Amino acid sequence: MRLVIVGSGIAGLGAAIRAREGGVDDVVVITRDRRGGSSWRAQGGIAVPIDDSDVKAHVNDTLVAGRYLNDEGVVWSYIGLARDVLNWLIRHGFEPCRGRSLEGGHSRARVVRARIGGDRIGEAVMSVLTRVSEEVGAQVIEGRLDSIEVNNNRVVGITLDDGDFIKADAVVLATGGYAGLYLYSTNDGDGSGIETAMRAGALVRDLEFMQFHPTVAMLNGDLFLISEAVRGEGARLVNKDGEYFMRRYDERAELAPRDVVSRAVYNELVRTGGVYLDVSPIKDFEEKFPAISSFLRAHGLRPGKDLIPVVPAAHYAIGGITVDALGRTSVRGLFAIGEASSSLFHGANRLASNSLLEALVQGYLVIRAFRAYYSGDTWRYPVIGRYDVVAHTRCRLASYVDIGRVRDVLWRYVGIVRSEDGLRRAIDELEGSLLPSLITKAAMIRRESVGVHYRVDYPSWSGTKFHILFRCGDEA
């Protein structure tokens, strides 16, 4: 049996290793760049319950951050498996820090960081997974996905952009999100895997939920993410007037969920002209955050002493390909995991460091689902809720898309603060570009503010729990 996995980040390589360990004899990983993608650059850590008594608290923190638009069953399942996947990673050579870290939205210090490298969790995990995937014999092919081939709503393989066809019994998409479609972003995800899945018949969901990271250093035109863990260690936000302002926005101050902190930083930037991170309260800053310190030194700042100028930036796509808890899409034999997927684990706002947890858990569960599918079990399609909105859209390939223009329009009109007038303008300007247009249309449809989606003209939330889905077909 052949399993083709598109993407070589934490989700993709985790699935490849699990597949080989589970007896799948032919595992092919397609990647644009073995050292590329957002996984290598991930900071912070992996959110894992401290012990049995912490599972319920972790679940509750995830639901509160997600404004209860999560699928509670998925949340319990993924967090329930968290310690198992961490132990699996440790058995393969990952070395965690002895203590845990506190990050925004968490009620306890439960975030696992890397012993070596500290704030370089992505590099630490990816180094392990890259080595192990080679040891277990997963085949890696460099190439770019062009299309997913489907016969009678059943995946039969993929075609690469050079025309090569690769036959497959099933395909797992681990191609990342679409934060890179924004002008200022911490990763380069362009959403191409999500678009390709749509053209194969898959549903997408919650594209309006783009999470912005509140503290990204911008120095001499270079962007560098300042990890959530920095605020967890005691760093404070201060505006250009010298005011420590977060208490005005939320009683949790710097440890409020990311959507709250991002809007606060945005508001203070507009109001005072500048926002900075004061890291002076952190003891041994350079030892705890070597990657951040290296970046600051390279740009003339003294790590641990000088104020760091910060801005919000697009960071994580909560929306993506509609999947169930095991990664199954609306197309038989097509799975999606990691940031490319919408499992409803995160709801309307992702809790800090839950993304690596999701990727590792899904990499485990998707192989169970693949083996069941290959053995002839009935394909279970993702459930569409009674209040969910399902819209049809044309999915024809555009002859040309000006990506620079797309990034500017999304940042300007579909960013941290949105309005009807701006969204209408964006829809007009983005005509012909599939995913950016759908992100904007979803933001237009959701006439309320919840989680990372904030409409200045509809600042409250009705409390109704619904999701917005798109599928290829005749324009509604």
Image: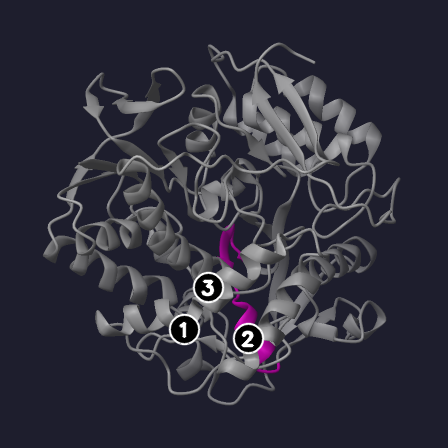
* Residue in front for this viewpoint, 280 or 418: 418
Q: Which of label 3 and label 1 is nearer to you?
A: 1
Mark sitting on residue 299: 3
Looking at the image, tell me whether mark 2 or mark 1 is earlier in sequence order: 2
- The answer to whether residue 233 is magenta is yes
Left or right of residue 229, residue 40 in this image: left
Report the disc number at residue 55: 2
* Residue 83: numbered disc: 1
Q: Amino acid at mark 1?
A: Arg
Q: Secondary structure at mark 3?
A: loop
Q: Give the image location of residue 446, x and y in percent.
A: 77, 36
In the rendered image of this protein, does residue 430 appear above or below residue 375? above
203 w.r.t. 78: above or below: above
Q: Where does the magenta region start and end?
A: 218-234
Looking at numbered disc 2 in the image, what kind of residue is underneath it? Val
Give the alpha-carbon distance from disc 3 to disc 2, as whole Å: 41 Å
Between 278 and 289, the residue placed more toward the observer is 289
Q: Is residue 312 above or below residue 288?
A: above
Q: Foreground: 121 or 467?
A: 467
Front residue of 56/336: it is 56
Judge left or right: residue 315 versus residue 23: right
| Quarter the C terminus occupies | top right
Labels 3 and 2 touching (C-beta < 8 A): no
Viewed as shown, does residue 334 lie left or right of 177?
A: left
Image location of residue 250, percent across then percent down: 80, 70
Quarter where residue 273 is shown: bottom right
Q: Helix or strand or loop: what does disc 2 sit on? A: helix
Amino acid type, residue under disc 3 in the picture: His
Label 3 crowd (10 A; few <14 / some 14-19 / many >=20)? few
Q: Residues within 10 Å of mark 2 (few under 14, many from 20)?
A: some
Q: Quadrant of the N terminus?
A: top left
